[in-house]
Amino acid sequence: MVQRIIEIIIYVISELKSKKQFDEIDLEKLKNLGYTNSEISTAFSWIADNGSFGDILDTKPQFNNGSKYFRILNPIEKDFFTENAVNELIHYNILGLLSNENIEQLLDKNLLHGYTKIDSNELKMFLANVVLDVYQKNYNANKILLSGNESIN
């Protein structure tokens, strides 16, 4: 379920960066893709509650910002990822969801735990860890995930 919420957050942030208005986001598209009202509400709740969300929307792609660098993967690092995961990694970095430091952490984690191909699902779980803090010691699933009978006003 966490991956699905991340997918909604990515969709909403992508839409907001291009349209800049919540009311212009097509929620029916999300429902048609199979996302539940609970998942959509949880994603919107995170967006509304996240104190740095405004910073994410105001962030220009890092390669346009003179004070920061855009993390380019060398051929060995690129081999850590499936082709789709590389494209998603770049997309999440441009959206401001993953910083260059987060990419370094992901690469280090992969090296320390033994080389494996990082696919799209593993990348979303890492993003969930960064964005939602789902693996923190004090993680309370009820804080992030709705049980399905709640509504957000």
Image (cartoon, rainbow, N blue to C red):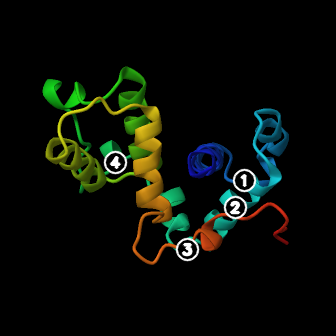
From the viewer's perspective, is 24 left or right of 11? right
In the rendered image, residue 51, in percent from the top left (x then y), is placed at: 53, 74
**Residue positioned 68% across, 46% down in the render:** 19
How far is disc 1 from disc 2 in space, using C-alphas? 5 Å
Residue on which disc 1 sits: 39
Residues marked 1 and 2 touching at CB (< 8 Å): yes
Looking at numbered disc 4 in the image, what kind of residue is underneath it? Gln
Residue 74 seen in this snapshot: no
In the rendered image, residue 118, in percent from the top left (x then y), is placed at: 33, 33
The mark lying in front, picked from 3 and 4, is 3
Looking at numbered disc 1 in the image, what kind of residue is underneath it? Glu
The mark lying in front, picked from 1 and 4, is 1
Res. 18 image quadrant:
top right
Residue on which disc 4 sits: 62
**Residue positioned 18% across, 32% down in the render:** 77
Picture disc at residue 42: 2
Looking at numbered disc 2 in the image, what kind of residue is underneath it? Thr
The mark lying in front, picked from 3 and 1, is 3
Badge 3 or badge 1: first in the primary sequence: 1
As rendered, which of 47 and 130 lies closer to the eye?
130
Residues marked 3 and 2 touching at CB (< 8 Å): no
Badge 1 or badge 4: first in the primary sequence: 1
Residue on which disc 3 sits: 140
Residue furthest out toward the bottom = 138
